[in-house]
Image (spheres, rainbow, N blue to C red):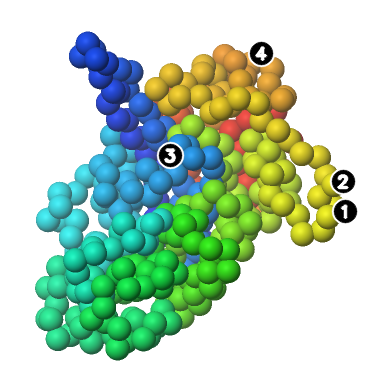
């Protein structure tokens, strides 16, 4: 990663109002994202992984300002965009795009593919003729036939529709694409094709990705670094080899133990970590470490004190040289990793 990250997220928090009861009483606020911090370099891919409801998709939507953060900062290409008005944010949107999970729900069924792909260019002030020419180029780039520009989304398969969504995200030649579960709604064989396409586009166009997923095998394939989220917080972040080869947080170890292995003998021999119960509600999180009710290694301190992200292990540039800095208390006591340049960090009192 360069000394100046393309994307820098610090103490990002998103709180939603609680549901009202039948009597009209407001419920407890839901802290969906609770102090998330990370850096992303140009041309790099960071994977955000975790169970459903952990806040990873909400984090991605705040980065592109589809949701406004409750607090915290999002600095993109040297500009803090978290507090910009929509008018001042518009010039930055061409460099910051998103691919959504469900290709059909994210494509307007009443618009032709030509209109869908060219719309970002038209919003940015481009001409209709130039936008259509660019749409044809992008159709070919993502492996579709330019002659199908005048068709509608329902005339394409799921994999083809997702390729259209990817083409739309590339219309303005962005530097960063937030990919929110881009292959989870597709068949396994189609998933591989879309992942290969995204890797090729990254090489050819120099894209950076924030790749949001719950499938750790896909994340291992496409990502350079991995951030593991639990109940709105990052509990472990580091280089892919470090996180997959020697996970430090018990939650990361449990997630990795659930990934199927291709070798049946290795699958039978390895330890399977089964987490008991469901994740707690973000409207009423546990005290101390939020993972302690499900953690097989929890101790008394885990029930009372919240662990902060700190350097663990000896691998990676940041961990080896100490340049990653110390973790500090962020908003509401949330963990904040500052100046992360490599290595691995975990929010655990007793990391492996």
Check if mark 2's residue and mark 1's residue have beta carbons within 8 Å.
yes
Q: Earlier in the sequence, mark 4 or mark 2?
A: 2
Q: CA distance from mark 3 to mark 2?
A: 33 Å
Image x and y of residue 166, in percent? 37, 69
Q: Nearer the viewer, mark 3 or mark 2?
A: 2
The residue that appears at 68% across and 56% down in the rendered structure is 241
Q: Nearer the viewer, mark 4 or mark 2?
A: 2
Image x and y of residue 344, in percent? 63, 46
Q: Nearer the viewer, residue 162 or 197?
A: 162
Q: CA distance from mark 4 to mark 1?
A: 38 Å
Q: CA distance from mark 4 to mark 2?
A: 32 Å
On residue 269, the disc is 2
Q: Secondary structure at mark 2?
A: helix
The residue that appears at 82% across and 58% down in the rendered structure is 263
Q: CA distance from mark 3 to mark 4?
A: 27 Å
Where does label 1 land, which residue? 265
The residue that appears at 26% across and 82% down in the rendered structure is 149
Looking at the image, residue 348 sits to the left or right of residue 72; the answer is right
Q: CA distance from mark 2 to mark 1?
A: 6 Å
Q: CA distance from mark 3 to mark 1?
A: 35 Å
Q: Nearer the viewer, residue 194 or 324?
A: 194
Q: Earlier in the sequence, mark 3 or mark 1?
A: 3
- Up the image or down, 256 lies above or below 308; here it is below
On residue 52, the disc is none
Check if mark 4's residue and mark 2's residue have beta carbons within 8 Å.
no
Q: Secondary structure at mark 4?
A: helix
Q: Earlier in the sequence, mark 3 or mark 2?
A: 3
- Up the image or down, 348 lies above or below 315; here it is above
Where does label 4 land, which residue? 300
């Amino acid at each position: 990663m360069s000394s100046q990250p393309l994307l820098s997220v610090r103490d990002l928090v998103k709180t939603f109002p609680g549901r009202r009861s039948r009597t009209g009483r407001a419920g407890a606020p839901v802290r969906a994202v609770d102090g998330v911090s990370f850096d992303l370099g140009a041309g790099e891919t960071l994977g955000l992984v975790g169970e459903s409801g952990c806040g990873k998709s909400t984090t991605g939507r705040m980065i592109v300002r589809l949701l406004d953060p409750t607090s915290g900062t999002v600095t993109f290409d040297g500009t803090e965009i978290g507090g910009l008005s929509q008018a001042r944010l518009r010039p930055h949107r061409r460099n910051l795009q998103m691919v959504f999970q469900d290709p059909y729900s994210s494509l307007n069924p009443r618009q032709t593919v030509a209109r869908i792909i060219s719309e970002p260019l038209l919003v940015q002030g481009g001409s209709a003729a130039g936008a259509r020419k660019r749409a044809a180029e992008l159709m070919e780039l993502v492996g579709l036939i330019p002659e199908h520009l005048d068709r509608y989304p329902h005339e394409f398969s799921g994999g083809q529709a997702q390729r259209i969504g990817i083409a739309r995200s590339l219309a303005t030649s962005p530097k960063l694409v937030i990919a929110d579960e881009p292959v989870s709604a597709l068949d396994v064989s189609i998933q591989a094709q879309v992942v290969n396409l995204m890797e090729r586009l990254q090489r050819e166009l120099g894209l950076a990705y924030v790749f949001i997923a719950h499938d750790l095998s896909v994340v291992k394939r496409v990502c350079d670094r991995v951030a593991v989220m639990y109940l709105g917080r990052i509990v472990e972040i580091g280089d892919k080899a470090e996180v997959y080869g020697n996970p430090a947080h018990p939650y990361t170890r449990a997630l990795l133990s659930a990934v199927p292995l291709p070798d049946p003998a290795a699958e039978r021999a390895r330890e399977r970590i089964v987490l008991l119960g469901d994740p707690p509600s973000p409207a009423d999180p546990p005290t101390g470490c939020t993972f302690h009710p499900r953690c097989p290694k929890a101790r008394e301190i885990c029930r009372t004190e919240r662990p902060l992200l700190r350097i663990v292990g000896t691998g990676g540039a940041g961990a080896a040289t100490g340049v990653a800095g110390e973790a500090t208390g962020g908003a509401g006591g949330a963990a904040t990793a500052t100046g992360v340049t490599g290595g691995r960090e975990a929010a655990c009192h007793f990391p492996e």
